[in-house]
Amino acid sequence: MLEIRTIIQHYHAWITFLFVYTFLASVALYKGNVQSPDTQSFVSWADLLINHQFNFFSFFSDSHSINSGHAASKSFFYIIPVTIIAVLKALFNDHWVSAFQASNLVALFFTLFFYTQIALHFKIRKWLVSASLLTFLISVDYLLWPRYILTDTLFTSLVMFSIYSVTTRTHNHFRSYILIIATVFLLLFTRPSALPIATVILFFSFLPSLSQTILTTKMLFIQLISLIFVSAILFSLVIMASTSGVIESDYIDFSRTWVEKGQVIHDRPDTAIRYEGTYLGAAKLFLYRMVGFFTPFANSFSLGHNILNGLSLFGCYGIILGMFSYSFRDFEKNNKRAMTIALLSTLIISVAIFQSATVIDYDWRYRYPVIAPLILLATLIFDNFFNSREVKSTYGAK
């Protein structure tokens, strides 16, 4: 009994990791896989790739024939999941869907694995690591998206791997840089919404001194809030320039039609606002979308869905906002905790800004990749709080 208790004391974070993964994987398998209209696009591209015998040059030349004239450029940014589906179809024929869901579960495993590795790397209290892992059990995103035959779970795993690559890199900078560059390419060719994540990862990886000077400071919170308002102004300028014909772009014109409808959350008219057609109106819509990105609730969600979302997300928000001042401890000493807090905060806000400028999806799909970074950020800040209390206690005892 003593030996078992010792093992649990030393490895309870990993035991919790295995429990959480087993539960989430079991839920995904029990409820079965789900396909969406986007799945069919990936399948069409995968079939085309198979028809061209995995000749990617021929594939890109011919993929304009699928869906729209922009399909070739779109498929380029999804080439990794398209290739995975094509390989699975070639290997497993009609059973490729089950194989893809299995790959989702592998990606889910590594998402939680990298999360745990990062947390233990920073010597966060093991009981707090275990408690934070249990948060994934009430995360609707982790209960929902691993079932979908989409890019989301693979992409989420790559996001956590990129964060792991930056935050735990060794003194062998050359090998670390190669790994980070490879990860960024994987992100960019898995889905186009990787752009803000790739930018933040590269900034913190290749410009550490500049990121330390600019962001790893006590002004981080104010800087990120300022970035949101600057982004709202730039968004307003682009939309109004498109309206007046100064800028001509099919993509911006398409986005402008959603702005003119006052769309906050895609296909949720109950969230729409009245758009005044002014600079201020466009900026206001952008800020409404920023709030919408972080909103846990929706009218069409079930009571259970809203409760779980509220508990997990508001719990993280409360810790981060209520204890953000504890992020600043030892910022001046260039410690890696401070850098990681700055990295995670910047990444989450950058994704929210990017999606607010483009589209907040109906089911908040694009928030899924930042849920694990959000929980990790809250856990780091909470651990800093306990560290500060211990320092004060020690100082008081003296």
Image (cartoon, rainbow, N blue to C red):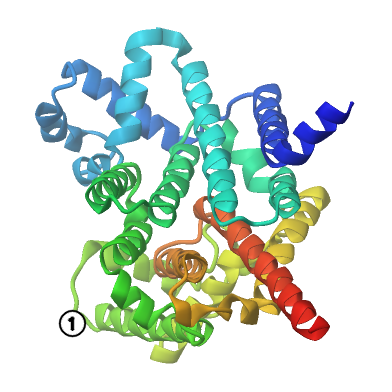
Rendered position, 4 above or below 364 = above
| Secondary structure at numbered mark 1 | loop
- Name the residue rendered at 65%, 28% in the picture: 25
Instruction: Look at 55% across and 39% down and name the residue there.
Output: 113
Relative to the observer, which residue lies in front, 15 or 59?
A: 15
Picture quadrant of residue 143: top right
Extreme residue toward the front, this view: 398
Q: Position of residue 9 (x, y in %)?
A: 78, 40
On the picture, is 123 further left or further right than 311? Answer: left
Please give left or right for residue 107 compared with residue 166 in the image: right
* Vertical arrangement, residue 352 with respect to residue 304, above or below: below
* Disc 1 target residue: 246
In depth, the one of 310 and 47 nearer the eye is 310
Which percent across, then down, holds residue 212?
37, 76
Image: 90 above or below 33: above
Q: In the image, residue 167 lies at what x, y percent?
A: 43, 56
Report the front residue among 338 and 395: 395
Left or right: 59 in relation to 322: left
The local crowd at label 1, few if under 14, some if 14 to 19, many if 20 or more residues have their Cα within 10 Å, is few
Can see residue 16? no
**Quadrant containing the N terminus in the rendered view:** top right
Give the amino acid at mark 1.
Val
For the C terminus, give its image quadrant.
bottom right
Q: Quadrant of residue 358?
A: bottom left
Picture mark count:
1
* Image location of residue 372, percent across then percent down: 57, 52
Tell me what residue is drawn at x 70 percent, y 55 percent.
Answer: 125
**For residue 266, side relative to residue 167 (left or right):** right
Residue 25 appears in the picture as rendered = yes
Please tell me which residue is depicted at 41% across the width and 85% down the height of the picture.
277
